[in-house]
């Protein structure tokens, strides 16, 4: 396979999900609804956001905002640009207030402003730290980036922190395949239940034995075959 065809295949593999025109139209309409809802939510939640901002400033005076706006939950001594799931002992970096914010997902609420600005959606694949290169490649491979990242998503209500990157990409791909108002309402409702029940909240690396309880492993699913294309995919992943 020559380099030009390989690049095309890597970008548009046989498992790449192509959303329909109907889904594209729905996403355009939902973008308007997202912004209106997020703006209204910001107004309603502004007292809470103000209180948390003040408390956070007192608790961690050196806190700062990321490009994805959220309340900082870790101390200034925490490693920079590292996903929490890659930390060996994240508990030593999480502040007392941060623990509460993470458990209740209040730290994610400022992202409503990202939604208002059109950078995110209420529902979609969760944004990544730019150092998470392997999962970014897999998302591109399966067409996940056709939809905006979201405050909550299908992977988050199906294990949250307890699923590995292959499971997350599987769920992200499944979301793109099924994106619709009905499916979004399902994700939204399950998100409420997950947050209220504090399900799947795990900071740092998860025990591999625990991860085996996840529903689907991408490497073992029918999505990955042994054809030449997937061989190229494995080679590309090793280069990432």
Image (cartoon, grey):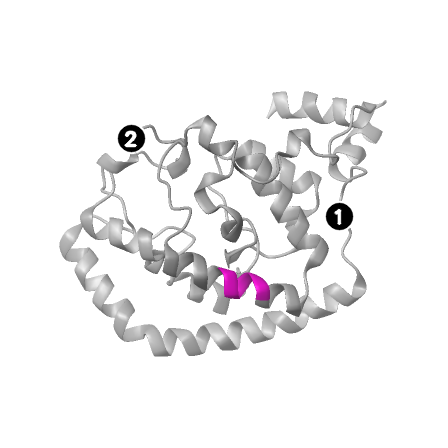
The location of residue 98, given as percent across then percent down, is 25, 50
Q: Give x and y (percent) for residue 179.
A: 68, 60
122 left or right of 45 in image: right
The answer to whether residue 149 is above or below residue 22 is above
Residue 3 visible in the displayed image: no
In the rendered view, does 47 fall on the left or right side of 157? left
Tag on residue 17? 1
Q: Quadrant of the N terminus?
A: top right
Instruction: Give the alpha-carbon distance from disc 2 to disc 1, as whole Å.
Output: 37 Å
Disc 2 crowd rating (10 Å Cα; few below 14, some 14-19, many 20+) is few
Q: Which residues are magenta?
A: 186-190
Identify the residue position indicated by label 2 in the image: 89
Q: Main secondary structure of the magenta part?
A: helix
- Categorize mark 1 by other alpha carbons within 10 Å: few (<14), some (14-19), many (20+): some
Provide the secondary structure element on which disc 1 rests.
loop
The residue sitting at 29% across, 55% down in the picture is: 101
Magenta stretch: includes residue 13: no
Q: Which mark is residue 159?
A: none
Residue 230 position in % (x across, y down):
76, 27
Residue reaching furthest left? 58
Which residue is located at x 55 percent, y 36 percent?
Answer: 165
Residue found 38% across the figure and 73% down from its top? 42
Where residue 57 sits, quadrant-wise, is: bottom left
Q: Nearer the viewer, residue 102 or 16?
A: 102
The quarter of the picture where residue 92 lies is top left
Side (left or right) of 213 relative to 137:
left
Q: Quarter of the image containing the C terminus?
A: top right
- Figure check: 39 above or below 83: below
Q: Secondary structure at mark 2?
A: loop
N-terminal of the pair, mark 2 or mark 1, is 1
The percent coordinates of residue 40 (x first, y second) are: 43, 79
């Amino acid at each position: 396979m020559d380099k030009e065809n390989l690049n095309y295949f890597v970008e548009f593999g046989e498992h790449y999900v192509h959303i329909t025109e109907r889904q594209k139209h729905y996403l355009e309409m939902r973008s308007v609804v997202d912004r209106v809802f997020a703006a209204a939510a910001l107004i309603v939640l502004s007292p809470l956001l103000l209180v948390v901002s003040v408390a956070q400033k007192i608790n961690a005076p050196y806190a700062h905002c990321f490009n994805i706006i959220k309340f900082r939950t870790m101390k200034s001594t925490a490693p920079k640009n590292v996903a929490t799931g890659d930390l060996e002992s994240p508990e030593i970096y999480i502040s007392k207030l941060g623990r509460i914010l993470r458990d209740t997902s209040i730290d994610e609420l400022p992202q409503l402003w990202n939604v208002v600005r059109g950078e995110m959606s209420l529902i979609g694949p969760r944004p990544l730290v730019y150092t998470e290169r392997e999962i970014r490649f897999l998302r591109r491979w399966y067409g996940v980036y056709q939809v905006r990242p979201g405050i909550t998503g299908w992977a988050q209500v199906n294990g949250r922190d307890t699923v590995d990157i292959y499971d997350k990409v599987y769920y992200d791909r499944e979301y793109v395949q099924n994106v619709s108002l009905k499916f979004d309402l399902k994700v939204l409702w399950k998100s409420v239940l997950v947050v209220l029940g504090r399900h799947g909240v795990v900071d740092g690396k998860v025990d591999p034995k625990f991860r085996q309880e996840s529903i689907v492993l991408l490497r073992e699913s029918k999505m990955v075959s042994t054809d030449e294309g997937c061989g190229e995919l494995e080679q590309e992943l090793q280069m990432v």
